[in-house]
Image: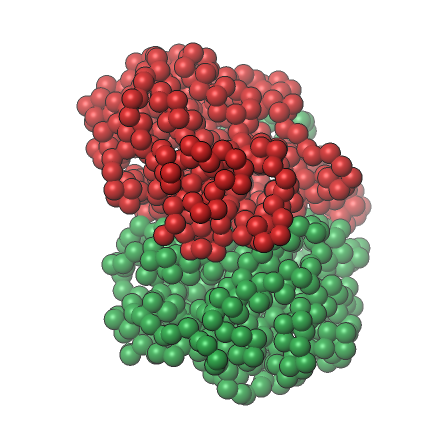
Amino acid sequence: MPEILLTSAGLITAAGRGAAPVLAAMDAGKPLFGDGPGGRGLPWPTAPMDPADIRWPEGGRWANMQKYANLSAHAAVAAALLAMDGAEPAAGADALRSGVVMAVGCSGSDELGEVFGKLAVRARTDERPLPKLLYDEFPDYSYIRGIPSQIGQFVAIATGFRGSNVAVYGEGGAGGLGALALARRLLRSGELDRVIIVGVAPPLAAGILTAYDREDPLGTEASPGRGPFDAERSGAFVGQSAVAVVLENADAAGLFGIADTPVEVVSCQTLCAPERFNALVQATRGAVHEAAAGPDLWWSHASGSVAQDAEAVAAVAPQVCAPVTSSKGTIGASFECGALVDLVLAAESMRRACVPPVGLLERPDPAFAGAGADIVTHAPRSLPRAASALLTALSHSARAATAGAAVLSWGGGR
Amino acid sequence: MTQGRAVTDSEIVITGMGVVTPIGDSVAKFWAANLAGTSGLVREYRMDLSQLPCGWVAGIIQENLKVQVAARSGRPGRSWGDTLMHDALAQALDDADLGRPLDVQAALVWARVWPGPSGSFPQDYPPHLEEAALRYEAAGADQAASVEYLRGKELPGELTDSSGFQAEVAEKLGTPLQATRLEATCSGGLRAIAEAARQIRLGEAEVAIVTASVSRSTPYVLSQYGQLMALSRWKGEAAQASMPFDARRSGMVINESSGAVILETAGHARRRAAPHAYAAVGGWGLAVGTGHVTAPDVGEVERVIRAAIADSGLTPEDIDTVNAHGTSTRLNDATEAAALRRVFGERLAEIDVCAVKSLTGHGSAASGVIETVAAALTLTHDVVPPVVTCTEPDPQCGVKTSLTPVARPVRTVLKCSFGFGGQYAAMVFRKPERVPAA
């Protein structure tokens, strides 16, 4: 089987563009939560993307296609173009050997909810049958705008990757590790040489956040002592992001020019089980076993959720002996693509041989130390030997019971 | 066959199948209706579509069957989309007679089409819309006020487009499953089968379960596809509304449906004495087109068909019959036919083509799984189903359809699925050359 290398990435978060600003904020203990653009006033602090970081390509064709593009599509294209790093879209045989995998949900934006409310009021008195009312008044293309692989077609256009396009998301997504696992298969099978995986966590509508809060409480105080792994944590923090990673077969690596110090994606599994905890135990076991060596760093999904953080420690800590960190206390949880964000951050941490501390963490839950979790607190920690990293991810909903794990190796393929 | 892949224990075979469709809630009924040309299309009676410019007909599961499906597979809080998948999957698992707990690595790939924020049925809309209106009156566009309004209120199950489906299946099978929920618009079902087969090819699973469902004949979705003018404008008898490759075709008919197939290695099937091996997966081709958001491209269709045939180790001369995507839209059928002509040349006139959507309507992602069931049965029974609505074949398409079943030896079936967003998929299925001992 060919080695699968991470050869380029694009990232947009509340810290701006790229991984370095996120790690700098984590190092400095500077959380990035706020009320978000427009001052939405929600009870859950959010780490928002800056709309100025989300750029839509110029030109007549792109202007015309905007009618099919929602906010997630804009963010996806912006992240994909960052990952392309100025490279021209793939062409010829190269384009047909390159594919797209999306990690973005169907129903995530505010667009639909607001229009529905207005039309619902109007429907009470409008004489037209409801289908006709919606036909006349609903913005054109609103349904197909939200289809994940429809967004993927924009990524295909922007990158020239025409091999295939599919979305992996929802209850099977595991924060983007489902997409990563599928992309690895496309490469390991020899079907493609190169895949761009693009994930988006857009601003979520009030109804969707309410549903998430009922599944597992969201954090209401983004303040010290409420962070992931903290004894006083009380809920998962919400983030927004767009992320793109380019995976390539070792033989094809180098198109985008940063393969001189690549990271190998050694293993990735997403499993569902009757209980989420068991899914995480077995996904971690499988990913670590396939990597054939214990990781030097564990980049955890830990989000500030009472349940998820406890499950993460109980499931993973007995299997690995490595310092653990999490980005969620700084940039929040990007539900559909949080693990892809963490993949980029973990790779950058391995490059700089330094692991950032967990944001908003003051006093680690005493139970976690007993379980053997070596949590990075308060200050960054040097890792003289950061040769491999374990990523883990959980579904936000316990009833969905999907978990994923992946192992990265520094210097793979070279 | 000229250069078929050697039959080995690692060959991937379909050993279990299940469907819930407008023409039957079991594989036996579905196949019988296919051969008899029994339509499941009816004039939509659950909402007033008279003022829409198209889309007055739908493929609806009969109400009495819905009750039975709900009784068999429904649970409190379970969405209709999940209920449909559970029902098809239960049929497929029973058909395959898989022991439980599964004692091998297994994968689950599923595609549940999101019906929009207000559920799967037109009758869901009045209460949901009234709730949406009350919320809008109370909160307007103020998100914080919306959250306050929603406190303590029931939320539509479809809101987050997420469920515990896969965990329930894992519990039923008594084992963790490699989980992939995917979406590739209307090619999603066939793509799901390809993804499952790839996991088996790579040795990551010995058994892979695929299921997909759709139920979205609602005011919102019809209004959206109506805006695209993608729906049938046929004003005559409802059963004739979907007429793939007919000169009078005017658009697709959307349906509610689900399908499921069980894939496993031939070796695993033989060791456990599986009762069936309906078909073997030959190979597949996948592509994304970047030319247009909704319009199909003949070059891309040709590309995936050629790739599927090559991946199967075959040549175009080895393909006996085609199970077409055949949506009944002007552009899709003409494009698909043009691509088939490019691949098969003059021989296309001799290749029997079937189009299941002529009877069921279009089930989006579910259609790829359901039509694979028909393809597998075509191989099993050596019969190509008719296209009874193609009574005036379009000479521009020039494909060979029949008004009656065609009994003939069938060694291979080419199956095509395409979708909005530049989605293209094709697979080749073959008659299994080694039937597991019962």
- Figure quadrant of residue A225: top left
Residue A233 is situated, as x and y percent measured from the top left of the image, at: 36, 20
Residue B190 is situated, as x and y percent measured from the top left of the image, at: 52, 61
- Figure quadrant of residue B346: bottom right
Q: Is residue B246 above or below residue A202?
A: below
Answer with left or right where residue B350 lies relative to residue A10: right
Chain in red, by letter, is A
Q: Is residue B252 above or below residue B342?
A: above
Q: Residue at point 55% right, 27% down?
A: A12
Answer with left or right where residue B377 lies relative to residue B179: right
Answer with left or right where residue B7 lies relative to residue A340: left
Residue B208 is situated, as x and y percent measured from the top left of the image, at: 38, 60
Q: Residue at point 58% right, 86% down?
A: B406
* Residue A37 visible in the shown view: yes
* Residue B186 visible in the shown view: no
Quadrant in which the C terminus of chain A is drawn: top left
Q: Residue at point 74% right, 53% down?
A: B228
Q: Colour of chain B?
A: green
Answer with left or right where residue B275 lies relative to residue B317: left
Q: Residue at point 40% right, 77% down?
A: B432
Q: Residue furthest left?
A: A370
Instruction: From the viewer's side, name the closer residue of A310 and A131.
Output: A310
Q: Is residue B37 above or below residue A288?
A: below
Instruction: From the viewer's side, name the closer residue of A155 and B251.
Output: A155
Report the coloring of the rendering. by chain
Residue A80 is situated, as x and y percent measured from the top left of the image, at: 58, 36
